[in-house]
Image: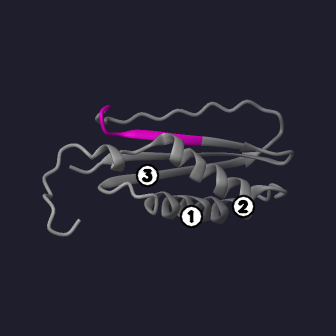
């Protein structure tokens, strides 16, 4: 980005946040790290932080320049219960977006979401 204008108010189409690409990044990391894992309440805080960091790093390397990324990972014990999650924020519908993926096995569930907001 050296020598380019820093006052861009819209990303070029090739640098726009693409939920399908981000969802695939999330899915790949979560499946790789959680497949065959059992729920352990002692490990969950560190595991969720580690997953969030890995997801953030992979999405950053996908080339979404000038995007602020927020990664949220929730891991819980799978007991057949229902879980409802929601989030709210103020953003520009033309530039900002999000992607999420859900992983469930016999022992745990994981919901990972990545929010990308364009930095003007």
> Would residue 94 appear left or right of 83 to someone viewing this image?
left
Q: Residue furthest bottom?
A: 2
Taking 22 as reference, is 52 above or below it?
Answer: below
Look at the image and tell me in which quarter the N terminus lies.
bottom left
Which mark is drawn over residue 54?
Answer: 1
Its colouring scheme is: one colour
Residue at point 80% right, 42% down?
78
Taking 65 as reference, is 11 above or below it?
Answer: above
Mark 2 closeness class: few <14, some 14–19, many ≥20 residues within 10 Å: few
Q: Mark 1 and 3 residues: CB-CB less than 8 Å, in contact?
A: no
x then y, percent, for residue 61 = 45, 63
Question: Which numbered disc flags the more N-terminal residue, 2 or 1?
Answer: 2
x then y, percent, for residue 56 = 49, 59
Question: Which numbered disc flags the more N-terminal residue, 3 or 2?
Answer: 2
Q: Mark 2 and 1 residues: CB-CB less than 8 Å, in contact?
A: yes
Secondary structure of the residue carrying tag 2 is: helix
> What's the CA distance linking mark 1 and mark 3?
12 Å
Which mark is drawn over residue 46?
Answer: none
Residue corresponding to mark 3: 70
Residue at point 43% right, 52% down?
70
- In the rendered picture of this protein, how many numbered marks are placed on residues? 3
Q: Can I make out residue 113 in this image? A: no
Of residues 77 and 63, the one nearer the viewer is 63
> What's the CA distance linking mark 3 and mark 2?
20 Å
**Magenta stretch bounds:** 93-100
Q: Nearer the observer, disc 1 or disc 3?
A: 1
Taking 54 as reference, is 79 above or below it?
Answer: above
Residue corresponding to mark 2: 33
Q: Nearer the observer, disc 3 or disc 2?
A: 2
Whether 98 is among the magenta residues is: yes
């Amino acid at each position: 980005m050296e020598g380019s204008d820093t006052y861009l108010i819209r990303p070029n189409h090739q640098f726009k946040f693409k939920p399908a690409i981000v969802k695939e990044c999330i899915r790949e990391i979560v499946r790789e790290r959680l497949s065959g894992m059992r729920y352990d309440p002692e490990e969950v805080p560190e595991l969720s932080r580690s997953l969030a960091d890995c997801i953030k790093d992979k999405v950053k390397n996908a080339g979404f320049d000038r995007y602020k990324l927020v990664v949220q990972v929730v891991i819980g014990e799978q007991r057949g219960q229902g879980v409802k999650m929601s989030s709210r924020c103020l953003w520009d519908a033309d530039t900002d977006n999000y992607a999420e993926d859900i992983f469930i096995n016999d022992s745990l569930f994981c919901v990972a979401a990545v929010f990308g907001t364009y930095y003007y």
